[in-house]
Structure formats: structure tokens, C-alpha cells
Image (cartoon, rainbow, N blue to C red):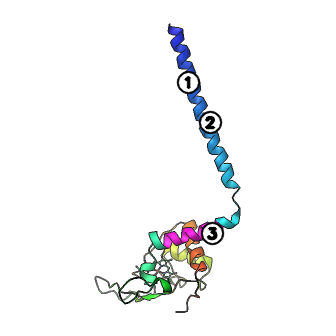
Amino acid sequence: MKSRFRLIFLLLFVLAIGLGASRLFSRESSALAAQKVPTAPAQQSSVDRGRYLVENVAMCEECHTPRDASGALDESRRLQGAPIWIVPVRPNPNWAMNAPALAGFSGYTEEQGAQILEQGVGPNGLAIRQPMHIYHMNHADALAIMAYLRSLPGTYPQQ
Ligand code: HEC
């Protein structure tokens, strides 16, 4: 009787190992399949990711896209620069009253863009003024945002 139990236990054990191994194997093979994706769509997906970060995570448009008469974002002038409507709680002489155009992003090198988005430091070496946030993005996110901004029609810093 005892040995039969042992046998059943052993069978279950072998079955569990088999299941685990097959999972591992299928995961490995799907990882291999993913590697075969050509590079062109990867670039497109970087633009898409940048757009997602700009529109839904970092909310750049709230300041950098002008508004229409009703106060809604004017998407026909997406990221073309806008006057700042937020006022500081306490008087702040270092408050920026204008958010520059970002569409095209041609006025910045990749290093300058990364410095702005990863450290909050502008090309002049000074901290970006409020109300712009000091972002501490990772490099991949900063590159994706720049790829998206460069995909938009427009030549920064013309406004
Ligand atoms: C709360 C408003 C606000 C948001 C949100 C915002 N910005 Fe800004 N941004 C500004 C203002 C204001 C300035 C001008 C700052 C200055 O003059 O120092 C600015 C400046 C910039 C500059 C120019 C910096 C320079 O020194 O030349 C870049 C590039 C920029 N923003 C990119 C972005 C991106 C990309 C996002 C989203 C990830 C974003 N901003 C989100 C308000 C904002």
C-alpha cells in the first residue's frame, strides 16, 4: 500500500516537472520569435511610445499646446508652443510665461533633449524654469519622446 502511494507521488512529481519545463520552453521560443522582429517597426513603436508618454503620462500638451476660445487644447496646433496660464501661488520672478514650441524638435541635439528630460537642465546650463516640471526620465523614454516630437511637423524654435 505504502509503495503505491509513493509511486503516485512520484508520478505527480514527474508531471509537475514536465509542466514547468514545457512552460519554460514555450516562453523561450516566444522570446526567440520576438527577436526576429525587423528594426523598422521598432522605430515606429518608439514614436508611438513617445506619443503615449507625451499625451498620457507627462502631459506635455497641457502647457506646450495652445488652447482655443473655450479653453480646450487646440490639436490642430499640437505642441506649437503656448502662453502659460498657470500663475504661481507666491510671486516668483523666475516664472516662465511661455512654453516654447516642441513640434519638430529640430532646435536641439539628442544630448540637449536628454539633458532637459533626464535632468531638467536646459542648453544654457540652467535649471528649466517653473512651471515646467523637472523630469527625471530614463534614457529610453527621453529618446522615445524626442522621436515622437521629431515626427511632428514644425521647426522649433520658430513660433
Ligand atoms: C506645467 C507646464 C509644462 C509641462 C507639463 C511641460 N512643460 Fe516644457 N516647458 C514649460 C515652460 C513654461 C517652459 C519654458 C521654461 C523656461 O523658459 O525656462 C518649458 C520649456 C521646455 C523646453 C525648452 C527648454 C529650454 O531651456 O530650451 C522643452 C524642450 C520642453 N519644455 C519640453 C517638454 C516636454 C517634452 C514635456 C513633456 C514631457 C514638457 N515640456 C512638459 C512648461 C511645461
Q: Label 2, secondary structure: give it.
A: helix
Q: Depth check: give the residue in front, 94 or 18.
A: 18
Q: Position of residue 21 (x, y in %)?
A: 62, 34
Mark 2, other Cα within 10 Å: few <14 / some 14–19 / many ≥20: few
Under mark 3, the amino acid is Gln
Give percent across and percent down for residue 157: 55, 89
Residue reaching furthest to the top: 1
x 68%, y 49%: residue: 32
Name the residue type under label 1. Answer: Phe
Residue 83 in sight here: yes
Picture mark count: 3
Which stretch is magenta?
A: 42-54
* Label 3 CA crowd tier, 10 Å (few <14, some 14–19, many 20+): some
Name the residue at 59% across, 86% down: 107
Instruction: Please tell me which residue lies in front, 136 or 17.
Output: 17
State the residue in front, 111 or 86.
86
Numbered circle sitting on residue 13? 1
